[in-house]
Amino acid sequence: GSAATEAVPILVSNLRHENHWVRRACAKALGKIGSPQAVDPLRGALSDQNRFVAHSAANALRKIGTRQALAALKGYRGI
């Protein structure tokens, strides 16, 4: 709904949070919302130092499923 859409910018900004649990939760939430606006930030999260954050970002991109989202996964070598 619209509340989820309004949350996207906040979730995106928290993909850079110092706590990896927060980054991971934000990536998962962005995948559930499915907003194409999140593709570029999630692409950046694929190289997160925490592999679970990176894996959550990859799953989110798969859930978003647009051509751009799936292209962002090329070259990703996750767990």
Image: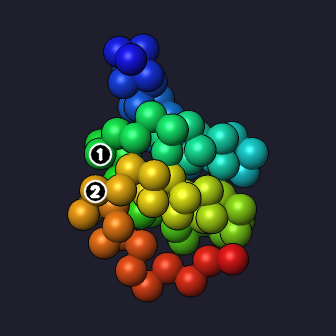
Question: What residue is drawn where x is 39% and y is 50%?
Answer: 64
Mark 1 Cα within 10 Å, few/some/many (few <14, many 20+)?
some
Name the front one of labels 1 and 2.
Answer: 2
Residue 7 position in % (x across, y down): 45, 24
Question: What residue is drawn where x is 35% and y is 56%?
Answer: 65
Eyeballing the image, is 16 above or below 14?
Answer: below
Where residue 71 sits, quadrant-wise, is bottom left
Eyeballing the image, is 1 above or below 16?
Answer: above
Q: Is residue 23 left or right of residue 70?
A: right
Report whether residue 55 is seen. yes
Q: Amino acid at mark 1?
A: Pro
Where residue 75 sits, quadrant-wise, is bottom left
Q: Amino acid at mark 2?
A: Thr
Nearer to us in this view, 1 or 76: 1
Question: What residue is drawn where x is 44% and y is 22%?
Answer: 4
Residue 54 position in % (x across, y down): 60, 64
Q: Which residue in the protein does label 2 denote?
A: 66
- Numbered badge on residue 36: 1
Label 1 residue SS? helix
- Numbered badge on residue 64: none
Question: What residue is drawn where x is 69% and y is 77%?
Answer: 79
Mark 2 Cα within 10 Å, few/some/many (few <14, many 20+)?
some
Q: Are marks 1 and 2 in contact (CB under 8 Å)?
A: yes
Nearer to us in this view, 21 or 32: 32
